[in-house]
Image: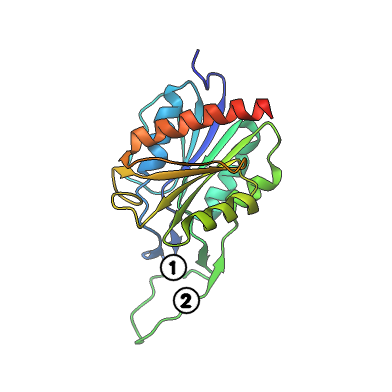
Amino acid sequence: MNFLANKKVLLTAGPTYEPIDPVRFIGNRSSGKMGYAIAEVFAEAGAEVILVSGPVNLQAQHENIQVVSVETAAEMYEACHEHFDSCQVAILAAAVADYTIANPSDIKIKKKTDQLSIDLVKTKDILKSLGQIKSDKQILVGFALETNNELENAKGKLEKKNLDFIVLNSLQDKGAGFKHQTNKITILDKYNKITKFELKDKSLVAQDILAYLQEFVQKMKNN
């Protein structure tokens, strides 16, 4: 029997686009490849996967994956909260914008001045909000993409957002992070365990995350 049979998993992937006007937006370099790889591996392991996806050039293949397409951080927040209660596991791999435009224009902004100032406001913290409402029977996993003080920053995020474990990527690792077909991760969990993995294809990274989840579930049962 597959490990995740009869289980529902919430996944997020890709970037969010925060509109400046009907033509322009603030976004990031996330391709969504890591999140989609996790979705495929988890679906193959028997899970019913709800994949909340920002704008990407990818297609989910497995029949057990339901894609919920969103564009903005606010839309991703709403979609995650709509489905979270029914899920046993949530893995938030999307690169969600920390800020959005305070007052996006309804029409294209013309180039009239040498400088243009845009007011930004914080987006709602999806991961933290789910950590505040998760039950003891749910497992919440976050991702952290860091450029410096990687372990310290990831550990802080793990604790502040009430996560069970966190998957850390560093942009200092060659071949890891956005747009690559490969990734190099470190997993930190709430039991203070730190596990480092080698650089490998994202489909194999997804297998590592699945295996870690299976071990983590067993650890929870023993504690």
Is residue 28 or residue 174 the one in the foreground?
A: 174
Closer to the camera: disc 1 or disc 2? 2
Please say if 85 is above or below 43: below
Residue 133, image x and y in percent?
A: 70, 43
Is residue 66 or residue 217 the one in the foreground?
A: 217
As drawn, which residue projects farthest toward the top?
1
**Residue matched to label 1:** 20
Please report the residue visible at 46 percent of the width from the left and 61 percent of the height from the top. 18
Quarter of the rendering containing residue 147: bottom left
Quarter of the rendering containing residue 121: bottom right
Is residue 223 or residue 115 the one in the foreground?
A: 223
Marks 1 & 2, CB-CB < 8 Å contact: yes
Query: Which residue type does callout 1 highlight?
Result: Ile
**Residue matched to label 2:** 118
Query: Which residue type does callout 2 highlight?
Result: Ile
Colour scheme in use: rainbow
Residue 188 in sight from this viewpoint: yes
